[in-house]
Amino acid sequence: MSAPPPLQIREANAHLAAVHRRAAELEARLDAAERTVRAQAERLARHDQQLRAALDELGRAKDREIAALQEQLLTSEAAVHSLQAAVRQRDELIEQLRPRAKLLQDICRQRPPLAGLLAALAEAERLGPLPASDPGHLPPGGPSPPLANSTGEEGDGDPLQPAVFGTTV
């Protein structure tokens, strides 16, 4: 076999040098890409850890909030039960007071006539008893002799004894 001509050797050497440069360039790019991928993987891992930590903290915060809301719910339910018991007690008191209120209403309706009667009794008391006079002689237009008790019972006192009015208010 014969040796290749020097031009072909130079071209082959130039071609090998170009292939070698291209391989070195590709290896450098591959190393840079691997470093980039590793850096991105590390950033993603850190980001993933941060997200997990944030999610864990959110979960704990959610659990704390749920516990606080449950406690608030229990407190509110206790307050509702207490208020319901107070309402029941007041309803019972109202039912107990209802007959008394009716009685007071009746008394208030009867008050004006009662006030008139009391005024008449006070006037009679102010006038006082009749002056002592002859029992057989009554003044004209004066009081008539006492009537017998409508129950049929005899009076214990003197029928001519003057009446004295009094009030017990």
Image (spheres, rainbow, N blue to C red):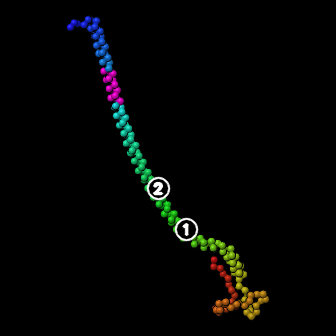
CB under 8 Å between callouts 1 and 2?
Answer: no
Q: Does dot 1 land on a helix, a strand or a loop?
A: helix
Residue type, numbered disc 2? Ser
Give the labeled residue for mark 2: 76
| Residue reaching furthest to the left | 1
- Compared to 61, does 115 lie above or below? below
Give the labeled residue for mark 1: 94
| 22 lies left or right of 151 | left
Give percent across and percent down for residue 83: 49, 60
Give percent across and percent down for residue 110: 66, 74
Give percent across and percent down for residue 123: 71, 79
Categorize mark 2 by other alpha carbons within 10 Å: few (<14), some (14-19), many (20+). Answer: few
Task: Give the residue drawn at x 41%, y 46%.
Answer: 62
Residue 38 highlighted magenta (yes or no): yes
Task: Give the residue drawn at x 67%, y 82%.
Answer: 165
Q: Does dot 2 land on a helix, a strand or a loop?
A: helix
| Residue reaching furthest to the top | 6
Badge number at residue 86: none
Which tag, 1 or 2, sits closer to the chain's start? 2
Camera sees residue 56: yes
| Residue reaching furthest to the right | 140
Task: Give the residue drawn at x 45%, y 54%.
Answer: 73
Provide the major secondary structure of the magenta segment.
helix
Task: Give the residue drawn at x 69%, y 79%.
Answer: 121
- Compared to 59, does 134 lie above or below? below
> Which quadrant of the figure contains the N terminus?
top left
Q: What stretch is highlighted in magenta?
A: 27-40
- Compared to 127, does 62 lie above or below? above
Give percent across and percent down for residue 13: 28, 10
Categorize mark 1 by other alpha carbons within 10 Å: few (<14), some (14-19), many (20+). Answer: few
